[in-house]
Amino acid sequence: MSDSGASLYDEVFEGLKCNRELEIYYNDSTYGVVTYRTLWQLWKDEDLLAECNDFLPLLENPLINGADIICANTHKTFPGPHKGILLYSNKRTSLAQASDATLNKGLYSSVHTHSTIALAITALEMDLYGAEYSNKIIENANRLGDYLAVHGIVSDMTAKGCYTSTHQLHIPIDKYDKSYTNIYDKFYESQLAVAFDISPHGHRFIRLGLQEITRRGIEPNELRLLAHTISQILTDYQPELCSKNIKSIRQSLGDEVNYSFDKGVL
């Protein structure tokens, strides 16, 4: 290592942050050069993995595993203003340079400073709270799946034995009503916004996103009431009661935004 007092983890992590090539010494000999493109090879060394276990989640980054570009947005699970993201494995590739030239020279003329500042604040919040926030979203989505299953509203299990590994929970609806517009009207009248989609096999389902109510601090009791209300909408619709339940859930959330600087800056 360049610094004999630094750990192997510190050395590798610094290389990741700076996106540069980094020569690592291991057991007094050169282990190799670490880059985003080649880091995946480190998985093969058990001793190295034991020492670098803390940064292993970084290896899930698609750019590390061979992707050239990632396209994303910043206004859904990432709770920022409406922006787009292009991430390149190497900004010097022809793909990155061509995209940059097209975007900067032809497609926009302003960075919209006000929303860029908001995006920067959101990025700082996610840097501090993002891991906890994402884990809680998945926990809430699967908890809601459990509560729905109690009412016989069953979502498909994944290969990992859970309902979802993301912020989304899918609820098949074909057996309740072939017309998704009828179901949508019931949800809308109950003051509950949901999205509908169709699987590759032609099956309709409700697509629920748990990210916003997670950030608003929803608790298990409210998730249980939400599951009960969804069941009522699908099987025994009572407009006034369903609307009352949703209103109660909203009032319980309060005004504080979790996983944010609402609770102060660390």
Image: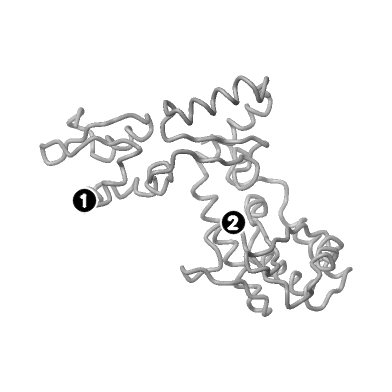
Q: Which residue is mark 2?
A: 167
**Residue at horizontal 87%, vertical 62%?**
189
Image coordinates of residue 85 in percent, x first then y, are 57, 36
Is residue 85 placed above or below 138 in the rendered structure?
above
Mark on residue 241? none
> Quarter-wise, where is residue 23 in the image?
top left
Judging from the image, what secondary structure is the residue with disc 1 in?
A: loop
Left or right: 30, with 122 as reference point: left
Q: Nearer the viewer, residue 128 or 232?
A: 232
Q: Nearer the viewer, residue 93 or 235?
A: 93
Image coordinates of residue 83 in percent, x first then y, are 64, 35
Q: Quadrant of the N terminus?
A: top left
Q: Which residue is mark 1?
A: 45
**Residue at horizontal 42%, vertical 26%?**
92
Q: Amino acid at mark 1?
A: Asp
C-alpha distance separating marks 1 and 2: 33 Å
Left or right: 5, with 177 as reference point: left
Left or right: 259, with 241 as reference point: left
**Residue at horizontal 61%, vertical 40%?**
73
> Quarter-wise, where is residue 187 in the image?
bottom right
